[in-house]
Image (cartoon, rainbow, N blue to C red):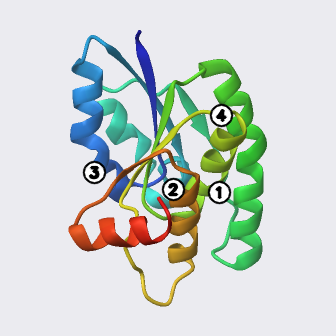
């Protein structure tokens, strides 16, 4: 079986953490890498960082624009809402075997929920971590609860994921 692993990236810093894994997936003959870029990658204000992904030799299978102007609750909520329809249509077309999500950013909420509904396993990187004073923790924990497989950075984070019942 050839697994189609769909890596979703929404920011340059997150992509930096995904780069080596994406390269290994791309070079594995048993795997097919699918890349979806979203979030700040597609924003002029952040330097259209999706171009870095292309320069690194990766094919972008889909660009999903969801960012609303502003960094307030309304803009963030509207951005997440835009993602539901767009990710659902994209998953229907790409038919990924696995969706790979890193971290705790709100841009990852819609693809995680859509994956759950479409019964596509979510593999989550960096669950169990803490970002004090931010809603990122709640988003990360929600993603953890909807994920099938967890890749944590430390034993402490592993313990937190297990305490959540995962």
Which type of secondary structure does the marked residue at label 2 adopt? helix
- Front residue (pair 70, 17): 17
**From the viewer's perspective, is residue 10 above or below residue 61?**
below
Residue 56 in view: no
User: Mark 2 or mark 4, which has the lower sequence index?
Assistant: 2
Q: Is residue 165 above or below residue 97?
A: below
Mark 2 or mark 1: which comes first in sequence? Answer: 2
In the rendered image, which residue does mark 2 sit on? Answer: 40
Tell me where residue 69 appears, x and y as whole percent.
68, 66
Picture disc at residue 119: 4
Whether tag 2 and tag 4 are in contact, CB under 8 A, the answer is no
Which numbered disc, 3 or 1, marks the residue closer to the eye?
Answer: 3
Q: Which residue is drawn at the image coordinates 34% and 27% (left, top)?
A: 58
Q: Secondary structure at mark 1?
A: loop
Q: Residues within 10 Å of mark 2 (few under 14, many from 20)?
A: many
Q: CA distance from mark 2 to mark 4?
A: 27 Å
Q: Are there few (<14), some (14-19), or many (20+) residues within 10 Å of tag 4? A: few
From the image, state whether disc 1 or disc 4 is nearer to you.
4
Q: Residues within 10 Å of mark 3 (few under 14, many from 20)?
A: few
Local crowd at mark 1 within 10 Å, few (<14), some, or many (≥20)? many
Q: Position of residue 146 (x, y in %)?
A: 58, 52
In the drawing, what numbered circle is on residue 76? none
Q: Quadrant of residue 62?
A: top right
Quadrant in the picture for residue 119: top right
The residue at 40%/11% (across/down) is 2
- Residue identifier under label 1: 67
Q: Which residue is mark 3?
A: 16
If you read the primary sequence from the N terminus, does the residue marked by circle 1 or circle 4 appear first?
1
Residue 88 vertical placement versus 58 (above, below): below
Which one is in front in this view, the residue at disc 3 or the one at disc 2? 3
């Amino acid at each position: 079986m050839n697994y189609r692993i769909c890596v979703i990236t929404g920011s340059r810093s997150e992509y930096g953490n995904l780069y080596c894994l994406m390269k290994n997936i791309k070079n594995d003959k048993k795997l097919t890498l699918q890349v979806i870029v979203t979030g700040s990658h597609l924003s002029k204000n952040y330097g259209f960082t999706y171009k870095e992904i292309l320069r690194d030799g990766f094919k972008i299978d889909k660009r999903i624009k969801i960012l609303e102007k502003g960094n307030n609750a309304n803009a963030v909520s509207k951005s997440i809402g835009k993602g539901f329809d767009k990710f659902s249509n994209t998953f229907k077309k790409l038919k990924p075997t696995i969706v790979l999500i890193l971290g705790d950013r709100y841009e990852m909420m819609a693809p995680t929920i859509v994956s759950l509904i479409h019964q596509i396993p979510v593999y989550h990187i960096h669950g169990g971590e803490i970002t004090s004073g931010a809603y990122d923790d709640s988003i990360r924990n929600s993603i953890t609860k909807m994920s099938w497989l967890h890749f944590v950075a430390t034993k402490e984070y592993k313990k937190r994921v297990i305490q959540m019942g995962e």
